[in-house]
Amino acid sequence: MSLRIGTAGIPQSVKTRSTENGIKRLAELGLGCMEVEFVRSVQMKEPKAQKVKEVAEQEDIQLTVHAPYYVNLNSREAEKVTASKERVLQAARIGWAAGAHSVTFHAAFYHDDDHEDVWQRVLQELREMRTRMDDEGIGLDLRPETTGSPTQFGTVPEILRLAQEIPGVYPCVDFSHLHARTNGQYNTYEEFAEVLDSIKTELGSSALQRMHMHLSGIDYGPKGEKKHLVLPDADMNYEAVLQALLDYDVGGWLICESPVLEDDALILQETYQRLQQETSRKS
Ligand SMILES: [Zn+2]
């Protein structure tokens, strides 16, 4: 599949805010996808999700879903783990009804636990979540995200190992989070290429043809992510990310979480198209 670029949620230039109007606006702008943001809670019901699916198909806008932030598969409290899994599953159910392809979420916090123990625990909970999705016939990809703070579970190797273990689990790569959690690393072509290389090695090139990714400007410090910034104000080397995506023939969905969603998504798309032309001229 080709690479589609779009926004995390409804574009700001939509006058009457609704998911359907957001999809129509993205089609007008010439963008290719939208992430449905259930980051506080999943308010959407099935009938509405079915309408969203119809509009998305009409307008040729593909959808992904972001599950609520209140998820911690490594909570000390069993009921919080159960509630976390239910939140992601509900986002997956409604996303599936809306025709979305992928659901992403932040899996856990380390607390003071050994990182390998946390990984084992996340593996176990994720296996159960995937089984429940399969039992219910929810066919979208389940994708733990690379996270923006060193206190959060979610390095590239951790996520790739989960994807190797559980069929139907894949990575969601947030390039800005990688940059923020390492206080400024992951900002060169070589580092981005290394991430894509490791995905190819661990999961095969089919994983690169169907990637769920996030990219925006970001402010960060020693504790990782502070807030998202507009691309022109940030040090994020998005051009190097896009060049690596081109060189590795990456397809799927690249979601922009900028404070000015569609403006920055369009910057990403225009830059990608320019690099594409330059690359094809060279070869
Ligand atoms: Zn996220």
Image (cartoon, helix red, strand yellow):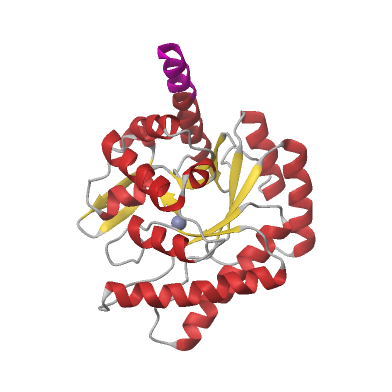
Task: Tell me if 184 is positioned left or right of 134 in this view.
Answer: left
Q: Residue at x 67, y 33 (%)?
A: 27
Residue 205, position as x, y percentages in the image: 48, 43
Q: Is residue 277 magenta?
A: yes
Q: Residue at x 68, y 64 (%)?
A: 138
Whether residue 150 is visible: yes
Q: Nearer the viewer, residue 163 or 4?
A: 163
Q: Nearer the viewer, residue 10 or 236?
A: 236
Q: Is residue 221 magenta?
A: no
Residue 226, position as x, y percentages in the image: 31, 54
Q: Residue at x 32, y 50 (%)?
A: 178
Q: Residue at x 49, y 23 (%)?
A: 273
Q: Which residues are drawn in magenta?
A: 273-283
Task: Tell me if 167 is positioned left or right of 239 in this view.
Answer: right
For the N terminus, give its image quadrant: top right
Task: Tell me if 18 is positioned left or right of 246 in this view.
Answer: right
For the C terminus, give its image quadrant: top left
Task: Tell me if 271 is positioned left or right of 52 in this view.
Answer: left
Quadrant of the rendered structure where residue 278 is? Answer: top left
Magenta span: predominant SS is helix
**Furthest-top residue in this view:** 281
Q: How many marks?
A: 0
Whether residue 10 is visible: no
Residue 52, position as x, y percentages in the image: 74, 50
Ligand 1 quarter of the rendering: bottom left
Q: In the picture shown, does residue 127 fall above or below 139?
A: below
Quadrant of the rendered structure where residue 56 is? Answer: top right
Q: In the picture shown, does residue 71 fall above or below 266?
A: below
Residue 48, position as x, y percentages in the image: 76, 58
